[in-house]
Amino acid sequence: MALSPASVGPVIAEVEMNAGADQGATTVRATVVQACSVFYDTPATLDKAEKLIAEAAGYGSQLVLFPEVFVGGYPHGSTFGLTIGSRSAKGKEDFRKYHAAAIDVPGPEVSRLAALAGKYKVFLVIGVVERAGYTLYNTVLSFDSLGKYLGKHRKLMPTALERVFWGFGDGSTIPVYDTPLGKIGAVICWENRMPLIRTAMYAKGVQIYCAPTADALPSWQASMTHIALEGGCFVLTANQFCRRKDFPPPPEYTFGGHEEEPSPETAVCPGGSAIISPSGTVLAGPNYEGEALLTADLDLGEIVRAKFDFDVVGHYARPEVLSLTVKTEPKHAVSFTSTVG
């Protein structure tokens, strides 16, 4: 389908989207959201999310994917005052504000997102900054069209400086959900470069592979196309489109890694969201122009046709030579045991 620019109009009333749809249908209408968070303002971000979900539902979309850490925000350009062996007072205050904008899972924001999925009758996959005590995680939450919270995936390996402000996920949160739309799962940003987590997703039968990201480089498109071909699955990738003016002004918020402060209109994250079929055909995007909704109809029959050529964990596997073990138990820093007398 054609690209539709995201609007900021009024929220539409509750609608009976897809109420009469055949839940066993082999075609799924999916929308990828390319939009920027309202940085440091989680209630406003949730309001914006509702407008975008409502708009996508208005197109008849059954599945809506938001970018990496849409709720809580991706801290483009921030260094949190870090140098080797030192952390500045301002950097610590920046982290306090970022921590305050994160959400608890479960929590009131999760309940609101669940209600939005049910209100607009969509399967919702959305990136959030999860707060677990004083540690933050880069997390994706999933909800069904009845408004039920399905679960979460925590990013296994934050990239580069992300490792100083996000914790590490473990094997207990690598879900693939068996839904009326197909088997849906999510892998975040450069996790998608990790062959073993991709293989785990394929082994779980993922059909609609969601890849929320903060990577707008041209090479990202090559990765997404490769995954679609390798996994014989549809790949949906969602990135934010952000300008410098979408973040607080200096000196409250400054951009590192630049020779000079970017101008307000500079695109600090230029998007690149896309939808790709199991044959490697680009169905929508990539878009580098602004905030937008990208929508496409996914013919699930393409998955079977693609698997006939290459089924990476089926007829193209050689488990007697190469195999993978995934440790799915949660890992805790402290475990308490007791002896019953």
Image: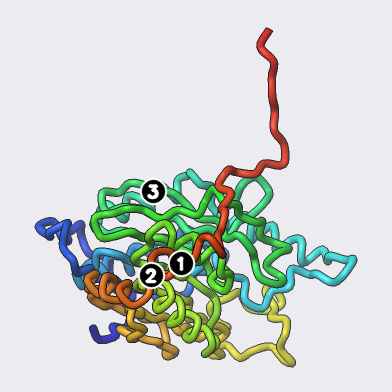
Residue that label 2 marks: 311
Identified by mark 2, the residue type is Asp
Identified by mark 1, the residue type is Ala
Q: Is residue 246 left or right of residue 80?
A: left
Identify the mark nearer the N-term, 2 or 1. 2
Q: In this view, does 86 lie to the left or right of 234?
A: right
At x 51%, y 47%, the residue is 105
Identified by mark 3, the residue type is Leu
Quadrant containing the N terminus in the rendered view = bottom left
Q: Position of residue 220 (x, y in %)?
A: 51, 83
Give the Cα distance between marks 2 and 3.
27 Å
Q: Are marks 2 and 1 in contact (CB under 8 Å)?
A: yes
Residue that label 1 marks: 317
Q: Are marks 2 and 3 in contact (CB under 8 Å)?
A: no
Circle 1: element type: loop
Give the Cα distance between marks 1 and 3.
30 Å
Work out which residue is located at the far front of the displayed protein and give it: 320
Mark 2 or 3: in front is: 2
Q: Position of residue 160 (x, y in %)?
A: 70, 72
Identify the mark nearer the N-term, 1 or 3. 3
Instruction: Judge whether residue 225 can be spotted in this image.
Output: yes
Residue that label 3 marks: 150
Give the Cα distance between marks 2 and 1.
8 Å
